[in-house]
Image (spheres, rainbow, N blue to C red):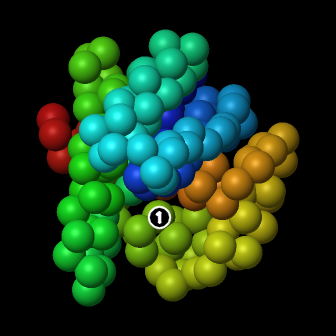
Amino acid sequence: MITILGIDPGLQATGWGAIRVKGSQLMFVASGTITSDPKAALCDRLATLYAGLQTVVAEIGPEEAAVESTFVSRDGAATLKLGQARGIALLAPAVRGISVAEYAPNLVKKTVVGAGHADKRQIRHMIGILLPKATPRTEHAADALAVAICHASHRSARTRVAA
C-alpha cells in the first residue's frame, strides 16, 4: 500500500488530497485547503503555503506526491505568482525526500473523467465515484484528489520509464 499526496497549487488557495493505493484499489485518506491572506506580502503568503504543506506532509506521511502543472494565462504577473506557489508545492514534499510528479491539467481531467476539458462539477462527481468516502470541502481539495488519482493511474508507467 502506498500513500499519495496530490497538490493543486494556488497563491490564494492550495488544495491537497491524500489517497492510499493498493493494486488498483483507491482509498480516501484526507483532503483540505491551505489559504493565504491576499492582503499580505507575497513572501508571507508563500511562507504560509509552505508551512501548511509541511504540516500536511508531516501528518499524512506520503511516499509519493503529485502536483498539477501551471497553465499559462494572458496575465504574465498572475502566471508568475502561480508559478511561485507551484514552486512551494514542489518544494514542500521534496525537502522530505518524497518524489514529486507533475501532471498537466488536461491529463488530470482525462484520467479522472475521461475528457481533457471536463468541468469542476464532472471532476467532483467522479471523485465521489472513485473515492466514495471523500469529503473535499472546496474545489481546490477536489482538484488535488484528482491529481492524486491521476498519479495513481500513471505511476506504474512512470516507474517503468525511469527504470
Q: How many marks?
A: 1
Name which quarter of the figure residue 28 lies in. top right
Give the residue displayed 31% in from the left and 46% down from the top: 42
Task: Please state, as top left, top right, bottom left or bottom right, where the N terminus lies in the image.
Answer: top right
Q: Is residue 142 above or below residue 46?
A: below
In this rendering, would 120 be left or right of 87?
right
Task: Label 1, secondary structure: give it.
Answer: helix
- The answer to whether residue 29 is seen in the rendering is yes
Q: In this view, does 54 lie above or below 127?
A: above
Give the residue displayed 27% in from the left and 80% down from the top: 75
**Residue 98 location (% of width, % of height):** 31, 23
- Callout 1 environment at 10 Å: few (<14), some (14 to 19), or many (20+)? many
Give the residue displayed 59% in from the left and 55% down from the top: 140
Q: Who is closer to the viewer here, 95 or 146?
A: 95
**Residue 116 location (% of width, % of height):** 48, 80
Give the residue displayed 66% in from the left and 68% down from the top: 123
**Residue 119 location (% of width, % of height):** 62, 80
**Residue 15 location (% of width, % of height):** 55, 47
Q: Who is closer to the viewer here, 78 or 3?
A: 78
- The answer to whether residue 2 is seen in the rendering is no
Q: In this view, does 67 lie above or below 115?
A: above
| Amino acid type shown at disc 1 | Val
In this rendering, would 67 be left or right of 35?
left
Q: Who is closer to the viewer here, 48 or 83?
A: 48
In this rendering, would 118 be left or right of 63?
right
Return the residue at label 1: 108
Task: Please state, as top left, top right, bottom left or bottom right, where the C terminus lies in the image.
Answer: top left
Q: Who is closer to the viewer here, 123 or 88?
A: 88
